[in-house]
Every structure is written in C-alpha cells, then in structure tokens.
Amino acid sequence: MKKYTLIALMFLLAFGTTYAQRTDEKYDREKLESARVAFITTRLDLKPEQAQKFWPIYNIFNDSREKSLREMSQLGRIKDLQLSEAEAKSRLTRKFEIQRKMIVDEEKFVKDLSTVITYNQIIQLNGLSREFARHIYQRRRDDDKK
C-alpha cells in the first residue's frame, strides 16, 4: 500500500510542478517584455521623454512586422505535397506583396522615429533585437547548466 501511495504522491508532485510552470508562463512573458524594454532603452541611451515617444512607435511597427512575418511563414508551408502551379504562383505573389509592404512600413517607421531619436540610434536599433535574443538565449543556456 505504501508503494501505491508513494507513486500517487510522486504523480501529484510532478503534475503540480507542471501546472505551476504553466500558470507562471504569462508572468515570464511580462518579465521578458520588461527586460526587452529595459535592454533597448539602455542600449539606445533613451531619455525618459524620448522613451515615452519611442515605445508607441516601435510597438506598432513591431506588431505589424511580426504579423507580416507570420503570414509569410504560413505562405511557405505546404499542407499538400501536390501544390498546383497556380496556387504556388499566388503564394509567391502574395509573399512579394507582403515584402513590399514591409519595406514601405519600415521607411515610415524610420521617418516617424527620426523625429524622436537620431539616425545613429535607429541604425543601432536594427541589431538590438537580435542582440537581446542572443542575450536571453545565453542566459537560459547558462541557467540550464547550473
């Protein structure tokens, strides 16, 4: 009987840990977003008044960019191995439309942002998202080693 009780206790403990990790997921996203904001704000050396104007512009652009990238990703997925030539051509045409829209959006973003920060800061911004992702990846990898 002790054996079954021990197994049940281990099962409940494992389930509880998994459940707790899932409920903390939103909190982790909030922490990650806060860390991203702090990272970019610090690296660009934004003054408080600049940051107040910068983040709304950046967030709108970033949301639009992510939506476009998701759509392009969907276009690249082949659900059937037999894709008609017309469907393939349609997908490629749509992909190019999205890419053109992304260029127009980025030009507008740079124009809007140039009223808040310098062009040098805008150039620095281009690499900061990737640098932040690498930084987070490295920290997770280091934490996993511990």
Image (tube, helix red, strand yellow):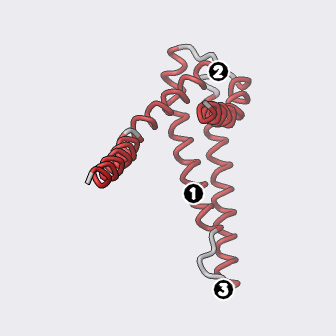
- Where in the figure is residue 137, as x and y percent of width and height? 64, 37
Name which residue type carries label 3.
Answer: Gln
Q: Secondary structure at mark 3?
A: loop
Viewed as shown, does residue 138 lie left or right of 11? Answer: right
Q: Which residue is mark 2?
A: 44
Whichever of callouts 3 and 2 sits on the residue coming sooner in the sequence is 2
Q: CA distance from mark 1 to mark 3?
A: 23 Å
Which quarter of the rendering shows the N terminus? bottom left
Disc 2 crowd, CA 10 A, few/some/many (<14, 14-19, 20+):
some
What's the mark number on residue 82? 3
In the foreground, 35 or 88: 35
Q: CA distance from mark 3 to mark 2?
A: 48 Å
Q: Is residue 48 above or below residue 1?
A: above
Q: Which residue is mark 1?
A: 70
Q: CA distance from mark 2 to mark 1?
A: 27 Å
- Count of numbered circles in the view: 3
Name which residue type carries label 1.
Answer: Arg
Name which residue type carries label 2.
Answer: Leu
Which quarter of the rendering shows the C terminus? top right
